[in-house]
Image: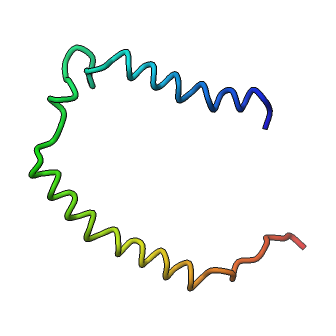
Amino acid sequence: MGEAAGDLQLQQPLAFAGLAYSFYPYIVPEMLTIDEATAAPEHLLIILNGVILVMPIIAGTTLFAYRAFGGKATNLTYD
């Protein structure tokens, strides 16, 4: 990776942050502010409960797949 790629990795987040700062407090310019776009706390609690329920299932499935299939793959060769 060259110097130009390293510069680009720094420039892109800075450019996005500058764009977001220039739009603040609007999500949709001149139409919708951050406060208007926020969800009600009751709805956020429902989402939190769903995440608390589903994330352990996803983590368990990922761990099972890692243990079941880990180390069985080999390098692909065309001999």
Question: Would you place residue 31 above or below residue 58 in this image?
Answer: above
Residue 9 point in image, percent of width and height: 63, 32
Residue 68 lies in quadrant = bottom right
Question: Would you place residue 74 above or below residue 44 in this image?
Answer: below
Residue at the image point whose x is 37% and y is 15% from the top: 22
Question: Would you place residue 60 above or below residue 10 in this image?
Answer: below
Front residue of this view, candidates 77 and 11:
11
Q: Is residue 42 left or right of residue 63?
A: left
Residue at the image point whose x is 30% and y is 20% from the top: 24
Front residue of this view, candidates 72 and 7:
7
Front residue of this view, candidates 74 and 14:
14
Residue 39 point in image, percent of width and height: 15, 42
Residue 6 point in image, percent of width and height: 71, 32
Question: Would you place residue 34 above or below residue 40 in this image?
Answer: above
Residue 26 lies in quadrant = top left
Residue at the image point whose x is 14% and y is 29% from the top: 36
Quadrant in which the C terminus is drawn: bottom right
Residue 27 point in image, percent of width and height: 27, 25
Q: Is residue 67 left or right of residue 6?
A: left
For the rendered model, the colour scheme is rainbow
Residue at the image point whose x is 35% and y is 73% from the top: 56
Q: Residue furthest bottom?
A: 68
Front residue of this view, candidates 76 and 65:
65
Residue 78 lies in quadrant = bottom right
Quadrant in which the N terminus is drawn: top right
